[in-house]
Amino acid sequence: MPEAANPNTQRGQGKQSTRSLFKLSYELASRYTEELDAREVVPGAEAIAGLDEFHEPLPLAGTNPESVINMLDRAGSPATVASTGGRFFGFVVGGALPVAIAAQWLATAWDQNAGSWALAPGAAELETVAARWLLELLDLPRDAAVGFVTGSTMGTFSALACARSALLTRMGYNVKHQGLTGAPQLKVVATDEIHPTNLSALGHLGFGLDDVQYCPTDDQGRIVPTQMPALGPDTIVVLQAGNINSGSFDPFEDVCQIARAAGAWVHVDGAFGLWARASASKRHLTKGIELADSWSVDGHKWLNLPQDSAIYACRDPEAVQEVFGVDATYLMRDTRREPNNYVPELSRRARGVEFWAALRTLGKSGVEDLVDRNCAHAQQFLQGLESAGYEILNDVVLNQVVFACDTEAKTKAALARIQSSGVTWLGPTTWRNRLCMRISVSSWATTTHDVERSLSVMQRAIQAEP
Ligand SMILES: *Cc1c(COP(=O)(O)O)cnc(C)c1O
């Protein structure tokens, strides 16, 4: 063998240089986090222009890893959105708990293939523990199967695959073996308030979006049970816990009772709203949710885990095994919980680690406090915006506030003013056919002072000339 040309892939690189590389990354990440509060919430033109540095030709020869990490920080860090800071209220993204980031770093160094117990005993057991804790915290059936996925889109995708398999199995049809062609037709009932990612999930599974039966909603975006079409053993109902705009919850108890009597399947998209269940004062919003058949919820939103983290739970573990169970001699399966048998992919990172670390750190009361604090901040926004002259367009029951000026032109002008402030950021939405602005409070880092600073920008913005 000729000498390898690239010193970075050689053993000689040494323990010392690995340690100094890790230290460099740690220092830069720590500095990034410390400076977050002082910088603009969204990157300015200069930071975006700085990304040009990445657009270089494919390097023919290697370089030293320190310079790569330094370049990543130099050009990459300024071009980030400070969504993990305290004054980003756009979308529903959540921050990232320091302990979850730290746990992810360690788990990244482990580089476990968390799909398999034999390959990753520690990661697999942490998933088992996290799954048990999550079912208890969210008060879902304790024997539900839990899969760790990338996000709620994949959570819903996975749950709906199980729903389809279970309903067709009850009709004596095995979709895994017999395929979709010739399968009995299933119906999907949802509302026009359904989150668009649920439509993606349905589409990936081969449900025709034109076939979805959209059911009317009330002024908060909640399904109206009396106006639902007839449900049957061939029906999947998709509900939501936490409307992306208003934060409202569908009336689970009423719908689930109808669905149960009809033999239908109910899936709940609880991407952020399912965490309301951890709060004694918000829990009433989720009444009857435990009667559903499957649920999806993000870790990377309101639990404040780093991105790429969610779970789904399914009442019917047999359906989960039917859909996702994989076996081969080399996988060395025995009676242990095999993480990949709950999700679409085999090889993957150890997502359970961050769930475990966050729950171990916060405890039940810490999750409750996180939810309650963000909901209290939403109330603070509600009052401040109202007294500034904005119109509030939703019942602020959770962490979401939808508001507007009296004309669309003024709303646009105010939004532009807020978005360019550098102090705070939120986005537009259409709510009940009206252009609005939307606040989502979902970061552990947000303080009362952050809300006050943001409100002062919003109070000035309503004066903006269209
Ligand atoms: C964010 C969100 C989704 C999609 O979740 P991802 O984690 O982005 O895949 C689905 N439904 C609701 C209500 C959401 O807020």
Image (cartoon, helix red, strand yellow):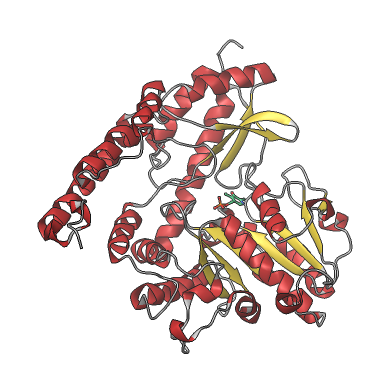
Along the horizontal axis of the image, is 322 left or right of 257? left
Q: Nearer the viewer, residue 185 or 422?
A: 185
Residue 77 to residue 267: above or below:
above
Along the horizontal axis of the image, is 14 left or right of 460? left
Q: Residue at x 36, y 78 (%)?
A: 121
Residue at the far bottom in the pictured view: 335
Residue at the far right in the pictured view: 230
Q: Residue at x 82, y 74 (%)?
A: 261
Q: x, y (%) of residue 21? A: 18, 50
Can residue 353 be seen at all in this image of the molecule? yes
Q: Quadrant of residue 188?
A: bottom right
Quarter the C terminus occupies:
top right
Q: x, y (%) of residue 44? A: 40, 24
Can residue 289 be seen at all in this image of the molecule? no
Residue at the far top in the pictured view: 465
Q: Residue at x 57, y 20 (%)?
A: 414
